[in-house]
Amino acid sequence: MDRSNPHLQTFQERGFPHADYPTGWFQVGWSDAFARGQVVAETYFGQDLVLYRTDPDDANAAGRIVALDAYCPHMGAHLAYGGSVEGDCLRCPYHGWSWDDAGRNAEIPYGERGSVNASTRSWPVREVSGIVFLWHAADGSAPSWDPPRMPEADAADFYRPYPWATHREPMHMHPQFAAENFPDLAHMRYVHRWAEIPEISLWQEDGPVLQVDYDGLVTTPKGPVRVATANTAYGVGLNVNRVLHGLRSTTLGAFTPIDQTRSEGFITVWVAKRDKDSTEPDGLARGIAAANTRELFGPDADRRVWEHQRYREHPLAVGYEARYTRAFRTWTRQFYPEPALISTGSS
Ligand code: FES
Ligand SMILES: [Fe+2]
């Protein structure tokens, strides 16, 4: 394997000191993408998973989304390839054994046993504000905080973003790269073409939630415009950016580890309506969603840096940057409960 290609290197080969994936809520999709009875194969946190929406008419299941380890405990069939939803259960395509939303064997459709005391792992899933979140904890512990609720999702003066203002794509990067980008002020000038390096007006840590507000001059075709943004990180996988001036928009950037080389990137943009009665996004709203998506996924924006970046455990940092970088990494340590695996020094 060509190890000089950073796309083939693991996070640790790129200098990241933690072997375990971070703890927290991570996006795995959008509610509207899961039709009734839909069964999909996904890989996150190095695990092959099956996600399905239970029967909305079933009194117990109520249309919840369930995530299970993908391989049937019986003979190892992948439950997403041919599995079918019945109530809150998923029936294996190979021999028809049925598994409930907690991953327990619910039925063996032949023989005398009825069922066995066996299970496949069930992962905590929550649907909030049209986003599907999966909880990961390296030690298997239950969720200790809630995924974010987006007021824009329920507000009549914002367009519903799915599908036109959403995008997903795998990237060769650890979510920490995107997380650290979020309070990175200088890069706003050099990557996002702000006219000046913005200034932080608020830094507020509250357990797994970090609020960082900043404002500055943004270059536009009509000249520089002052923009104020409010930014909230929920763990290392979820970043919310709110533009508060002019036409308001709120962007959720989410990065979910796939394996030790890639993360799935998700973007969702809620754009305010100029006309409250409008139901279809106008050209300006579409333009804002496309521009925000380009800033994350475009070939000449953050992505170009992240996909080729080395993690500097001891970055060179000057002035205020040193203070914020240190504060940010101290805050993110809570999402990596195991001790750092390796010390990479400053090389
Ligand atoms: S492999 Fe799933 S029922 Fe046999
Ligand atoms: Fe950025």
Image (cartoon, rainbow, N blue to C red):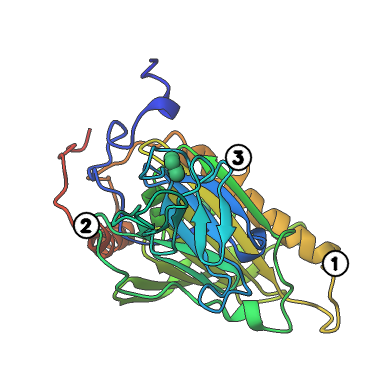
Crowding at mark 1 (Cα within 10 Å: few <14, some 14-19, many 20+)? few
- Disc 1/disc 2 C-alpha distance (Å): 46 Å
| Foreground label between 1 and 3 | 1
Give residue 192's position: percent from left, percent from top: 58, 52
Amino acid type at mark 2: Asp
Give residue 126's position: percent from left, percent from top: 47, 69
Q: Tell me: 289 left or right of 193.
A: right
Looking at the picture, tell me which residue is in the foreground, 111 or 23: 111
Q: Quadrant of residue 141?
A: bottom left
Which mark is first along the chain, 3 or 1? 1
| Residue occupying image coordinates x 19% and y 37% | 344
Q: In this view of the protein, can residue 102 be seen by the observer?
A: yes
Q: Tell me: 4 left or right of 252.
A: left
The relative height of residue 11 versus residue 317 in the rendered view (above or below) is above
- Tell me the residue that label 2 is attached to: 139
- Tell me the residue that label 1 is attached to: 282
Amino acid type at mark 3: Asp
- Tell me the residue that label 3 is attached to: 300
Amino acid type at mark 1: Asp
Give residue 184's position: percent from left, percent from top: 42, 57
Which mark is first along the chain, 2 or 1? 2
Which mark is first along the chain, 2 or 3? 2
Give residue 248's position: percent from left, percent from top: 67, 75
Q: Quadrant of residue 244?
A: bottom right
- Disc 1/disc 3 C-alpha distance (Å): 26 Å
Crowding at mark 3 (Cα within 10 Å: few <14, some 14-19, many 20+)? few
